Amino acid sequence: MTDSIPEFDQLPLGAVKDRVRSLAAPALRELIEHEERHGNRLPVLEILRSRLAQLDAGAQPTGGDPTRAPGAAEHAHGSPVQEATAAESTTPLRHGMAEQTPQRGRP
Protein backbone atom coordinates (compact mmCIF):
# COMPACT_ATOMS: atom_id res chain seq x y z
CA MET A 1 0.00 0.00 0.00
CA THR A 2 1.16 3.53 -0.61
CA ASP A 3 0.71 6.61 1.55
CA SER A 4 -0.75 8.77 -1.22
CA ILE A 5 -3.62 6.48 -2.25
CA PRO A 6 -4.96 3.89 0.21
CA GLU A 7 -5.68 0.45 -1.28
CA PHE A 8 -3.85 1.46 -4.46
CA ASP A 9 -3.02 -2.13 -5.39
CA GLN A 10 -6.70 -3.11 -5.39
CA LEU A 11 -8.07 -0.17 -7.37
CA PRO A 12 -9.59 -0.73 -10.80
CA LEU A 13 -7.97 1.11 -13.68
CA GLY A 14 -10.62 3.85 -13.88
CA ALA A 15 -10.24 4.67 -10.20
CA VAL A 16 -6.46 4.91 -10.56
CA LYS A 17 -6.87 7.41 -13.38
CA ASP A 18 -9.29 9.54 -11.36
CA ARG A 19 -7.28 9.53 -8.14
CA VAL A 20 -3.85 10.38 -9.55
CA ARG A 21 -5.08 13.66 -11.02
CA SER A 22 -4.82 15.34 -7.62
CA LEU A 23 -1.26 14.15 -6.92
CA ALA A 24 1.91 16.18 -7.35
CA ALA A 25 4.93 14.84 -9.23
CA PRO A 26 6.78 13.43 -6.17
CA ALA A 27 3.76 11.35 -5.15
CA LEU A 28 3.38 10.08 -8.73
CA ARG A 29 7.04 9.06 -8.81
CA GLU A 30 6.50 7.17 -5.55
CA LEU A 31 3.51 5.36 -7.06
CA ILE A 32 5.47 4.50 -10.22
CA GLU A 33 8.27 3.00 -8.13
CA HIS A 34 5.74 1.11 -6.00
CA GLU A 35 3.93 -0.27 -9.05
CA GLU A 36 7.18 -1.32 -10.73
CA ARG A 37 8.22 -3.23 -7.58
CA HIS A 38 4.87 -4.86 -6.90
CA GLY A 39 2.11 -5.26 -9.49
CA ASN A 40 4.02 -3.96 -12.52
CA ARG A 41 0.68 -3.55 -14.33
CA LEU A 42 1.41 -1.96 -17.70
CA PRO A 43 -1.92 -0.06 -18.00
CA VAL A 44 -1.44 1.42 -14.51
CA LEU A 45 2.14 2.42 -15.28
CA GLU A 46 0.99 4.06 -18.51
CA ILE A 47 -1.56 6.14 -16.60
CA LEU A 48 0.97 7.16 -13.96
CA ARG A 49 3.70 8.03 -16.46
CA SER A 50 1.27 9.93 -18.67
CA ARG A 51 0.07 12.02 -15.74
CA LEU A 52 3.66 12.67 -14.65
CA ALA A 53 4.47 13.87 -18.19
CA GLN A 54 1.45 16.20 -18.05
CA LEU A 55 2.69 17.67 -14.78
CA ASP A 56 6.21 18.03 -16.16
CA ALA A 57 4.70 19.91 -19.11
CA GLY A 58 3.00 22.41 -16.80
CA ALA A 59 -0.29 20.82 -15.78
CA GLN A 60 -1.39 21.36 -12.20
CA PRO A 61 -2.83 18.78 -9.80
CA THR A 62 -6.61 19.01 -9.60
CA GLY A 63 -8.51 19.57 -6.39
CA GLY A 64 -9.61 16.77 -4.16
CA ASP A 65 -8.05 14.38 -1.71
CA PRO A 66 -7.29 10.91 -3.10
CA THR A 67 -7.11 9.48 0.43
CA ARG A 68 -10.75 10.38 1.11
CA ALA A 69 -12.21 8.59 -1.90
CA PRO A 70 -14.14 5.37 -1.22
CA GLY A 71 -11.98 2.30 -1.01
CA ALA A 72 -11.87 -0.38 -3.65
CA ALA A 73 -14.04 -2.73 -1.60
CA GLU A 74 -16.57 -0.11 -0.50
CA HIS A 75 -19.91 0.22 -2.20
CA ALA A 76 -22.99 2.10 -1.05
CA HIS A 77 -25.22 -0.99 -1.13
CA GLY A 78 -22.63 -3.73 -0.99
CA SER A 79 -22.29 -6.25 -3.76
CA PRO A 80 -25.03 -8.83 -4.24
CA VAL A 81 -22.59 -10.97 -6.21
CA GLN A 82 -21.40 -14.05 -4.41
CA GLU A 83 -19.45 -17.04 -5.60
CA ALA A 84 -22.49 -19.24 -4.98
CA THR A 85 -24.68 -17.09 -7.25
CA ALA A 86 -22.14 -16.36 -9.97
CA ALA A 87 -22.73 -17.74 -13.45
CA GLU A 88 -20.89 -20.90 -14.34
CA SER A 89 -17.92 -20.44 -16.63
CA THR A 90 -19.71 -22.52 -19.28
CA THR A 91 -22.68 -20.15 -19.42
CA PRO A 92 -22.93 -18.98 -23.05
CA LEU A 93 -22.70 -15.31 -23.79
CA ARG A 94 -25.37 -13.57 -25.83
CA HIS A 95 -23.15 -13.37 -28.90
CA GLY A 96 -24.74 -14.79 -32.00
CA MET A 97 -28.28 -14.09 -30.82
CA ALA A 98 -29.15 -12.71 -34.26
CA GLU A 99 -29.34 -16.27 -35.55
CA GLN A 100 -31.69 -17.22 -32.72
CA THR A 101 -33.90 -14.13 -32.73
CA PRO A 102 -36.41 -13.81 -35.57
CA GLN A 103 -36.10 -10.72 -37.71
CA ARG A 104 -38.86 -8.29 -36.78
CA GLY A 105 -40.78 -6.60 -39.55
CA ARG A 106 -39.35 -8.82 -42.27
CA PRO A 107 -41.26 -11.47 -44.16
Image (cartoon, helix red, strand yellow):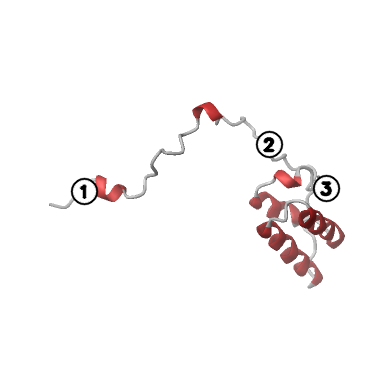
Q: In x, y percent, where is residue 38?
A: 77, 51
Q: Quadrant of residue 45?
A: bottom right
Instruction: Please report the residue visible at 25 percent of the width from the left and 49 percent of the height from the top.
Output: 99
Q: Which numbered tag is attached to residue 13?
A: none
- The residue wearing badge 1 is 104
Residue at 69%, 57% in the rendered image: 44
Q: Which amino acid, mark 3?
A: Thr
Using the numbered discs, state the Cα–Cα distance from disc 2 to disc 1 in whole angstroms: 43 Å
User: Which residue is denoted by mark 2 in the rendering?
Assistant: 73
> Reading the chain from its start, which is encountered first: label 2 or label 1?
2
The image quadrant that residue 77 belongs to is: top right
Real-space Cα separation, disc 2 to disc 3, in angstroms: 16 Å
Give the left or right position of residue 83, taking residue 53 as reference. Answer: left
Residue at point 32%, 50% (across, down) = 96
Which residue: 79% across, 43% down? 6
| Snapshot quadrant of residue 79 | top right
Viewed as shown, does residue 29 lie left or right of 100? right
| Amino acid beneath label 1 | Arg
- Which type of secondary structure does the marked residue at label 1 adopt? loop
In terms of secondary structure, where does tag 3 sit?
loop
Which comes sooner in the sequence, label 1 or label 3? 3
10 Å crowding of disc 1: few (<14), some (14-19), many (20+): few
The one of 95 and 107 positioned closer to us in this rendering: 95
In this view, the residue farthest toward the left is 107
Where's the N terminus, which quadrant?
A: top right
Disc 2 marks which amino acid?
A: Ala
Distance from disc 1 to disc 3, alpha carbons, whole Å, reads: 55 Å
Residue at the disc numbered 3: 2
